[in-house]
Image (cartoon, rainbow, N blue to C red):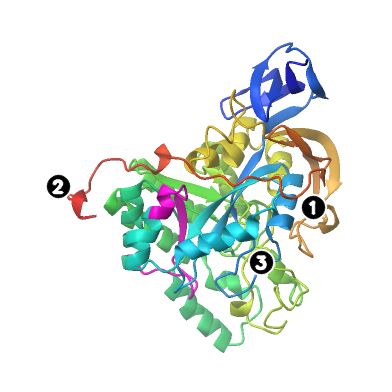
Amino acid sequence: MAAYDRVIRGGNVATAEGSRVADIGIKAGKIAAIGEDLPRGEDETDAHGRIVTPGGIDSHVHIAQVSGMGVWTADDFESGTRSAMCGGTTTTISFAAQHRGQSLRKVVDEYHARAAGKTYIDYAFHLIVSDPTEQVLGQELPALIADGLTSFKIYTTYDALKLSDRQILDVLALARRHNAMTMVHCENHDAMTWLAEKLIASGRTRPKYHCFSHNMPVEREATHRVIALAEMLDTPVLIVHVSGREAMDEIRRARARGLKVYAETCPQYLFLTQDDLDKSGFDGAMCMCSPPPRDKANQEHVWIGLRDGLFDVFSSDHAPYRFDDPKGKKVAGTDASFKKIPNGVPGLEIRMPLLFAEGVLKGRLTLERFVAVTATNPAKIYGLAPQKGAIAIGADADLVVWDHERELTVSQRLLHDAMDYTPYEGMKVKGWADLVFSRGELVAKGGEPLAKAGRGRYLAHGPSDWSKPLGRSIFPEDISDIF
Ligand code: URP
Ligand code: ZN
Ligand code: ZN
């Protein structure tokens, strides 16, 4: 009998700490050995001359969800996880989103039902908390955290989702008590609304004015405010979808004070600019997301932040609304003002390949940083390590063997989500995910699916050191008992 179910032989095995040429022996879906000249496996995969990384964890994904504007995402768990898998992602963390008046527990049950039997790869949930009532804070959230739903996103904007500063403090205090991770969407709602009303009243309604309303100072201000609130309570916080330098500077200043402030960015801030929202007619709506893409200089700053460790996580913020669809971007018609166009861009299939091709292969990002931000850090931050996010003995054999020679022109035709466009259409790239393994099973090859839906498993989150308070106070005496 063969020693392993499969051996991936002779690849350049990359982890967040470094890389070396080695064989990977897989048994019962787990990594059983890493070394040289391993005995033969039942199946053999030749990876000589290829890079092997952990399968990606996309920790910011909206699928089978109704947005803050009341629009359903185009992707459900089947199309969403199929698409993720074909691009080298082997775990998604999507949102179970509470809308006001809903019981969080019921919301979670609904998302479990939406995902059950549908997913191609393993999946976990974050919560979106939009209604932190006494019942939610006192009973539902603590019980859900105990069940392994230990991370939640809150919003400073969107009428249907936004929390007041006071409510943000309530949620942060709860996160502190229960060692949970709070992710925050940071934009100043009142400033954006004020500006949007004036823009629209003056006839400036086209998609490009979305960027005027969602400008950098509104992102910077809310980032600063949320960090200050978290500092007050000595609670770690993760700022999601950071778009450029000014918000990054707030995070750098917080880090310089020793705070546990984590940061996430996304492909749209590396590969799109505000000019993409100024395409003819309604086309700019394709690239409309919040915060919006900025300019070339900000793109460079985001690359710097990925390189130097400011960014802990590179996620897609996949928020798929079809373009030519009355239930998608055109829900309010093509003459609608930018305020009525669903916010979000797709990207979960292309997240890993774009960063690999444009980052690693073009020398802008080390392989170690690539692995850290696409897999290892999200696993640690959200309590999925050591099972996920690393090439280590005992970890799930979620792996990608990369084809660094493959040249292609990005096209929606190549992708496997339920969308009718990609914002990256026409981009020429060299390098793509070739062989994708999920728990040892070859689930995609050359960007095409091999597995069947329904094999994915739900993952509860474990405890994470990243979400523990620092144990220090801004007050002259310890008053943490009142939080
Ligand atoms: O525009 C975006 N990012 N839409 C998705 C929802 C969110 O805020 O992440
Ligand atoms: Zn957001
Ligand atoms: Zn999002």
Q: Residues within 10 Å of mark 1 (few under 14, many from 20)?
A: few
Q: Nearer the viewer, residue 289 or 439?
A: 439
> In the image, 165: left or right of 15?
left
Q: Would you say the beta carbon of the disc 3 residue lies within 8 angstroms of ligand 1?
A: no
Secondary element at tag 2: loop
Q: Is residue 100 depicted above or below 258 in this figure?
A: below
Disc on res. 476: 2
Mark found first going from the N terminus, 1 or 3: 3
What amino acid does circle 3 point to?
Thr
Q: Is residue 231 depicted above or below 280 in this figure?
A: above
Mark found first going from the N terminus, 2 or 3: 3
Residue visible at 49% across and 74% down in the picture: 160
Q: Is residue 342 depicted above or below 480 in this figure?
A: below
Q: Nearer the viewer, residue 122 or 447?
A: 122
Secondary element at tag 1: loop
Magenta segment range?
143-165
Give the CA separation, mark 1 to mark 2: 55 Å
Look at mark 3 in the image and give the residue it sits on.
73
> In the image, 439: left or right of 59?
right
Q: Residues within 10 Å of mark 2 (few under 14, many from 20)?
A: few
